[in-house]
Amino acid sequence: MLKEKSIKYVLLFDFYSEMLTDKQKEFFDLYYNHDFSLGEIADNEGITRQGVRDSIARAEETLEHLESKLGFYAWYTDCFQGIGRITKAAGEIRSINERSYQDTQIRDCVDLIAVVSEQLTSNQEG
């Protein structure tokens, strides 16, 4: 659950980071993207660990608020899941075609779906 929450925050940061203060961006990035501890960030910045945590918590709150209003993360995850369902259905169509029809047009369409799905999945993960 913690890793899932971290992944969500990293994606929210990708979508909405420009709405955070410079310090929130810096602390959030160090904490979530570079795996710095609160103590390490605090030591580097010359502030308390609690100060770092408060800044990150405010950033998380801002990101969650923006998501509730704009919904980019929800849209993104829905698209990613939809591509997975399309890929699975294309595989089933391929199997049925190979077993029963051996139609080259169907095969070519399924191949195209697989290529486009792979490209979209690669773009989303990268």
Image (cartoon, grey):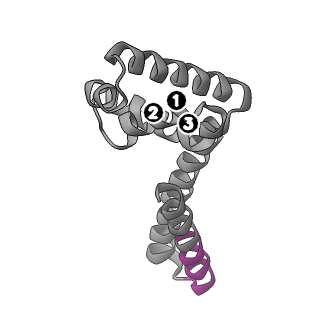
In this rendering, the answer to whether 118 lies above or below 105 is: above
Where are the magenta residues, as a range? 103-114
- The residue at 54%/25% (across/down) is 59
Disc nearest the viewer among 3 and 1:
1
- The residue at 29%/36% (across/down) is 36
Q: Disc 2 vs disc 1: Cβ atoms closer than 8 Å? A: yes
Main SS of the magenta part reads helix
The quadrant in which the N terminus is found is top left
Label 3 sits on what residue type?
Answer: Leu
**Residue 115 falls left or right of residue 44:** right
Percent across and percent down for residue 49 are: 32, 18
Q: Which mark is residue 12?
A: 3
Q: Residue 112 carries which label?
A: none
Distance (Cα) linking label 3 and label 1: 13 Å
**Residue 46 falls left or right of residue 63:** left
In this rendering, the answer to whether 125 lies above or below 118 is: above
Q: How crowded is mark 2: few (under 14 residues within 10 Å), some or many (20 or more)?
A: many
Classify mark 3: helix, strand or loop: helix
Q: Name the residue under label 1.
A: 24
| Mark nearer the N terminus (2 vs 3) | 3
Classify mark 1: helix, strand or loop: helix
Label 2 sits on what residue type?
Answer: Phe
- Which quadrant of the figure has residue 51? top left
Label 1 sits on what residue type?
Answer: Gln
**Can you name the residue that lies furthest to the front here?**
46
- The residue at 66%/39% (across/down) is 72
Q: Name the residue under label 2.
A: 28
Q: Which of 36 and 126 is in front in this view?
A: 36
